[in-house]
Image (cartoon, rainbow, N blue to C red):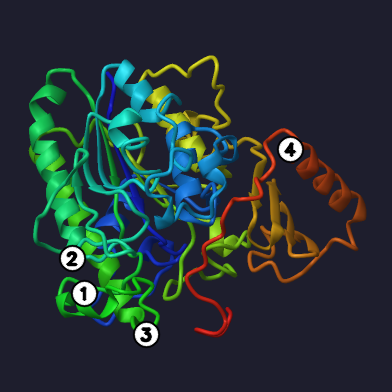
Amino acid sequence: MQPNIIYIVADDLGFADLGCYGGRQAQFGAVSPHIDALAAGGLRLTQGYANSPVCSPTRVALATMRYQYRVRAGMEEPINSRSKGSTVLGLPPELPTLPSLLREAGYATALIGKWHLGYPPSFGPLRSGYDEFYGVMAGGVDYFSHCAGRGDHDLYLGEEEHHEPGYLTDLLSDRAVGHVGRMAEGARAGKPFLLSLHYTAPHWPWETRDDAALAAQVKDNLFHLHGGNVETYRRMIHHMDEGIGRLVAALRTEGLLDNTLIVFTSDNGGERFSDNWPLVGGKMDLTEGGIRVPWIAHWPAVIAPGGTSVQQCMGMDWSATLLELGGGVPHPQYPLDGVSLARILRDPADTFERPLYWRMNHRTQRALRRGPWKYLKVDEHEYLFHVENDARERANLARHEPARFAQMRDDWLAWNASIAEIPADATVSLGYSAKDMPQR
């Protein structure tokens, strides 16, 4: 029987922000008790990665199950608000996607939350496999006014602007809970559903449920460079966690929890107030803190509780996994780069070698992870790290392991030759720099 699938993606969540990944409690208590419960009742991965250290490239890969560099929009870092009206910077509707292929396999498909893959009329969730959409098209919006960085209102129902008062995280959670209620009868009768629940939390601006007054302050600069703190950030995660708890409760009430596969992750590593310990760096970096993220899978019918896996993987692998488990078939003209992890769900100890490659226009970064080793280049500097022994990437072994270093560099160059070059007009959008705050 095909499982119902809920694919939850947080925005800019750090590797150690959650209690189940070693995160510390906030002043108000546990930050993520409901997400922690999913991990305790399912599988937690400790060596899972995002396809990119920034939003929209990762989302290209999650949707297409291929390296994001195969799509022009996937080489923006990230797609920014100036792309509105572009016929180039978005996810091409003709590309097969996880939702389109699962829809062909009989699924009802919906995206609730952040899209960030181009604007209508050229692009949009309803043009790339989703039956329903409620959420934001842009990369970041105010949690109360629902306006994007240029001051344009950015909350949609389908492709129509939708005005609804409320704190965005709660609106997304409410809509997800309601969606499960609407899908329940069909799911019990054998019509499975895919719900992509892509929160904007805990992405800036730094607004909790009680901070509506801040909307006027940040409307001209959503990066919110003058505000925020660790406690506010943790409260934003907690609001998301509360919504996930309500979603799980709805599945339980409807009798759907046992055969619903819930996958939770972040689109990239943490930003200003996140906790990435013991990793170094964060969003926009190919050091571990920018790309290693939480990966949790919960599916009582199949996944034994309390599991931990050290399988190396990235986001497109999870999308390929969901496609296989849902009975979807890859399009022969668009072979997947993602590798299914279905065997890991059944036996977390059953690991396999999975080389992982990254490239960033920003600071001409490169990375390759294979087994315990990682080749890294940042600016003109190159490194070789044994990341199992040195998760903080402090001990550069390039001179001590010259043959291994040369081989991994050559492997990266060979892989890079298999994908398109970064076009000259590709943008790197940095919201702040060392003039705003000291570098990490």
Q: Is residue 335 left or right of residue 388?
A: left
Task: Give how far apart the Cα atoms at labels 2 and 1 are.
Answer: 7 Å
| Label 1 sits on residue | 215
Total numbered circles:
4
SS for dot 1? helix
Q: Is the residue marked by circle 3 packed among few (<14), some (14-19), or many (20+) residues within 10 Å?
A: few
SS for dot 2? loop
Residue drawn 49% across the image and 32% down it: 65
Task: Give how far apart the Cα atoms at labels 4 and 3 are.
Answer: 42 Å
* 4 vs 3, front mark: 3
Q: Quadrant of the C terminus?
A: bottom right
**At which x and y percent is residue 237?**
29, 65
Q: Is residue 284 above or below residue 235?
A: above
Q: Is residue 216 above or below residue 85?
A: below
| Label 2 sits on residue | 145
Task: Give how far apart the Cα atoms at labels 2 and 4 are.
Answer: 44 Å
Q: Are marks 2 and 1 in contact (CB under 8 Å)?
A: yes
Task: Give how far apart the Cα atoms at labels 2 and 3 are.
Answer: 19 Å
Q: Quadrant of the N terminus?
A: top left
